[in-house]
Image (cartoon, grey):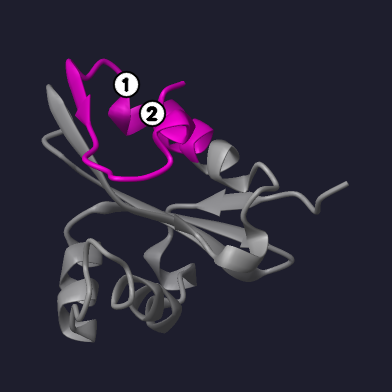
């Protein structure tokens, strides 16, 4: 049995350097600066996934909170993939009170399509 995932939207709890380290190696944000990651987080609704106090997952939502939201920068660290944590993170994102009633939720991805289909 996997340890439980705690999801938080408190940016103060998130490991910005870990997030930057993952994103700068990702196919969609390769080479992104730490400053740009910080700015993007400050202007988004961010979700951190934590196991035993350690951040293992991240997602952020850019939205007008009325009609549209864009889901971006979604990841689960490689050592934690395949355990259902990505689905749990997405469940928390889509259940967030500020994101209810939107007409459109968009994600552009080249991978893990089934994860986001729910």
Q: CA distance from mark 2 to mark 1?
A: 6 Å
Residue 26 percent across, percent down from the top left: 32, 68
Dot 2 lies on which element?
Answer: helix
In the visual, does 73 lie left or right of 114? left
Residue 69 percent across, percent down from the top left: 19, 34
Dot 1 lies on which element?
Answer: loop
Circle 2/circle 1 CB separation < 8 Å: yes
Determine the residue located farthest toward the right in the rendered image: 1
Name the residue: 42% across, 71% down: 12
In the visual, does 54 lie left or right of 27? right
Residue 25 percent across, percent down from the top left: 33, 76
Query: What range is drawn magenta here?
Result: 90-118
- The residue closer to the viewer here, 32 or 111, is 111
Residue under numbered circle 2? 97
**In magenta segment, residue 33:** no
Asked if residue 99 is positioned above or below residue 82 in the image, the reply reads above
Residue 98 percent across, percent down from the top left: 31, 32
Asked if residue 10 is positioned above or below residue 68 in the image, the reply reads below
Residue under numbered circle 1? 100
Asked if residue 67 is positioned above or below residue 12 in the image, the reply reads above
In the visual, does 14 lie left or right of 78? left
């Amino acid at each position: 049995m996997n340890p439980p995932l705690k999801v938080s939207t408190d940016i103060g709890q998130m490991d910005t350097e870990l997030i930057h380290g993952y994103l700068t190696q990702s196919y969609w944000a390769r080479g992104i600066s730490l400053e740009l990651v910080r700015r993007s987080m400050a202007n988004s609704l961010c979700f951190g996934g934590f196991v035993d106090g350690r951040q293992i997952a991240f997602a952020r939502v850019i939205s007008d909170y009325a009609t549209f939201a864009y889901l971006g920068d979604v990841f689960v660290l490689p050592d934690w993939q395949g355990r259902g944590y990505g689905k749990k993170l997405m469940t928390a994102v889509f259940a967030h009170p500020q994101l209810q009633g939107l007409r459109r939720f968009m994600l552009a991805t080249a991978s893990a399509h089934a994860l986001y289909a729910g």
